[in-house]
Structure formats: structure tokens, C-alpha cells
Amino acid sequence: MKERLVLASGSPRRAKILADLEREFDIVKTDAPEVSYPDDPERTVRENALAKGAAAGGGRVLSADTVVWFNGRIYGKPRDIGEAKRFLRELSGNVHSVYTGVAFDGDVKVVRSDVKFRGLSDAMIDEYVAKVRPLDRAGAYDIDESGDLIVESWTGSYENIMGLPLEPLRAWGLGYIERGFPVRSYEAGTDNNLSLPSLCNYLQEIAGLHADKLGVGIHLLRSEGVTWMLSRLRLEISRPVAWGGELLVRTWPSGTRGRLAATRDFIGRDLAGDEVFRGVSEWMTVDLAARRLVKLPENFRSLAPDGTPRVELGESGGKFASLGAVHGRSPIRVRLSDHDFNDHVNNVHYVEWALESVPEEYRRRRVSRLDIVFRQEAKAGDELESCSETLGDGVLRHTITRVSDGALLATAETVWR
């Protein structure tokens, strides 16, 4: 389990940005002496960020320093209202640069954005200063608070202008959750190793916990009449974990696909630090009453900004229309106990059902790759059929269909070692 994060800053803007990635962190204000090199803003923010982090003590400390730079001069926080107005007057009508140094775990990164101010009259400056507290802002302004009064345009990271760019945070892996799962006897298969359905249960569990921490959890969504639905899961499994071992699973929101699909990535390691699996999942939101897709929550895109790391997987073929031949077949009857609190069949059961029709000669092998696509839902009492086709080189394709109407509920491809 990762150590609790410390934000070495009293800035409410930085805390607000960080809260979108990490809901649990402590704030420590430091009084580290600051340096200023007017001809080198990058060095200025780099050294100040490192000094603030060191002053906060050890552990997982995130620290930052931001300056405005224009015409060979560094604009920090103004000392009084008079100096704040002078800063704004000098920046009026010009393009200036905002530099932020961000330090974490001994590393430091510098991000630059450029901002163009409107031409500001004294009356406009007086109005802005009356609305915004300029004394605790580099350059005497806050782009996120009445910024439209003075800012004409900007390029680069918006969050950098606020004081905490997201790109370095994502590069350092902030915004993820990690949890250890001891492999129980009932989670192991006939080979004494963690079974594929049990692994999928782990992923579903940790994804739900993280979504809840990020403010997009399933219970909150259900209170608004919608819920999450897993639409696709792709896994590459490189090594087994035996009963009695432990799997460390890390997950994070990794992006969006259009307006309807959100992606979440996973990496799993054993206690020795060796990678066990990696995975990518796609999720959609569904209206509970109408049972139709709806747009993602508005705040979701902020959880996976530019620079968010993504798991890379090889090509896979879980999306297809039908099997060319059937080499394995198994009937399935959907039980009431297969339903979860969304009142539909839990996704992991589709993985179990796909494996039911695997030909006998594959049952002493293990799955090294899974790509499953969820198409329609099943209900208790439905009669289903699981079918498998052998493609050669250890590759199988699977379909799950409803017998009554022939509806295709899920397709999958597995690779076996």
C-alpha cells in the first residue's frame, strides 16, 4: 500500500488541482527560503520547488514553485496592493510566461505556459484587484478567478498557470490506487494458481474503490439515475501467482474515447516486483431506467489529463461477429445469484462462461491473453450457449448467445500457453 501523499504548499489552488487526482493527502506549509534568478526562471522554480520539498521532511512529498516571467524580470507574489497593480499594468497587453517547478521523490520537472493579457486600463485593474486577492498569487493574478477580465488567451497547460501542472504528476504515477490481494484457496484453479475469473474480480473491486475515491463511484452515479457498465476488458498475463501468494494491483483512469467511453488501465506485480499482468478496460455510463448509454460525467475528463501514462497492449481480436466453426459448446442457465447490485449479471460471469466451452486439450494450459467485449445483458432464467472455436497457435474465440432469440451477449478471444 502506498504511503500517504504530502502537499508541501498552502495554496488552495494547488490543493484543488491535486484533489482531482488524489483524494487523500496531507498539507504541510513550509517556510523554505526562496531564490530568484531574473535571467533564469527555470532554475528559480526548480531550486525553490526542491527546497520546499526538503523542508517538508521525508516521505511522498509533492512541492511546487510558480513565477511569472516577462521582459527579463521575475514576478512573484506582490508585497502590497500598490505593487499588485503595478505588476498588472506592466503585463497589460503583453505575452508573459508562467513557469512552475514541481518536485516529487527527488525528481523535479519544469513546465512553461504563455499568457497574453488584454490591454488593461486603470479602471479594469482596480476592478480586478477588488474582486481577487492578488497578494498570494505570482504575478498578482489568478487565471481561474475572474481571469476573463484580464486574460485574452494562453497556450500550454492551464493547470500550470494555476500553479500545479498535471503532466509531471501523471508521469510520476500520481492519481493511482494500489492494493494487495492475497490469493485465497477458493480463488485458485486446478493448477493451484490464481484463476482468470478471480483476477477479473480483483480488477472490478479495485476499479470500484478508486472510482468512489475520485468522486465518480457507482453509488453516487446510481443516486443520479445512472451506473457504470464495463464494455471491454483486455489483459496480458505474463506469469502466474500461486495460492498463498499476493498480487499488487495498481489502477488509474487513463483517458476517454469519444463522449461515451472512459478507459482505465491496470498493472499487477508480485511481491518481488515482477510484472504479472497488464490490462486496459473500457467503461460506459448507462441510464438505469431507460437502459441506454449516456454521456460521461462532466468531471471525468479532468481525471486523465494530457500526459497520463497508458498501458500498451499487443493486437487482439475480441471484436468479431460470429465464429467460423464450433469446437466446444456448453449450455448455461443464468442464476439469480449471478446478478449484482445493478440487477444485471456481473461481468466476471461472462468470463467464466466463455471458459466453460474450452476444448479439453486446453484445460491444462493457462490463459496469457484475454480480450472480451460485452454487448448485451443477460437476466436470471435466461438459457445461454457458450461456444469456442480453435484458431491454432493457442488462440481461441468465444461467443455467448441467448438461446431464445440468438442475441450475441459477448465475444472474446483468448490465447493459451
Image: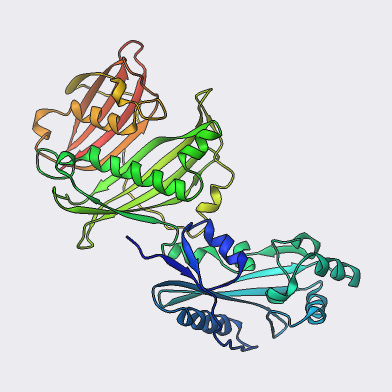
**Left or right: 228 with respect to 312?**
right
Left or right of residue 392: residue 52:
right
Percent across and percent down for residue 253 are: 45, 50
Instruction: Report the residue at 32% width, 35% height from top.
Output: 372
Quadrant (top left, top right, bottom left, bottom right) of the N terminus: bottom left
Residue 318 appears in view = no
Q: Nearer the viewer, residue 50 or 368?
A: 50
Q: Is residue 361 left or right of residue 234?
A: left
Q: Between 96 and 247, which is closer to the camera in this rendering?
A: 247
Taking depth in this image into account, of 311 and 34 the one nearest to the observer is: 34
Find residue 322 and report its horizontal and vertical position in percent: 31, 23
| Residue at x 46% of width, y 57% of height | 308
Decide: is 13 above or below 372: below
Tell me where residue 232 appears, x and y as whole percent: 38, 37
Q: Which residue is at 69% across, 79% downward?
A: 77
In what quadrant of the picture does the C terminus appear? top left
Residue 343 at what x, y percent from top left? 40, 25
Instruction: Determine whether, in the image, residue 396 is placed left or right of residue 34.
Output: left
**Residue 189 in sight:** yes
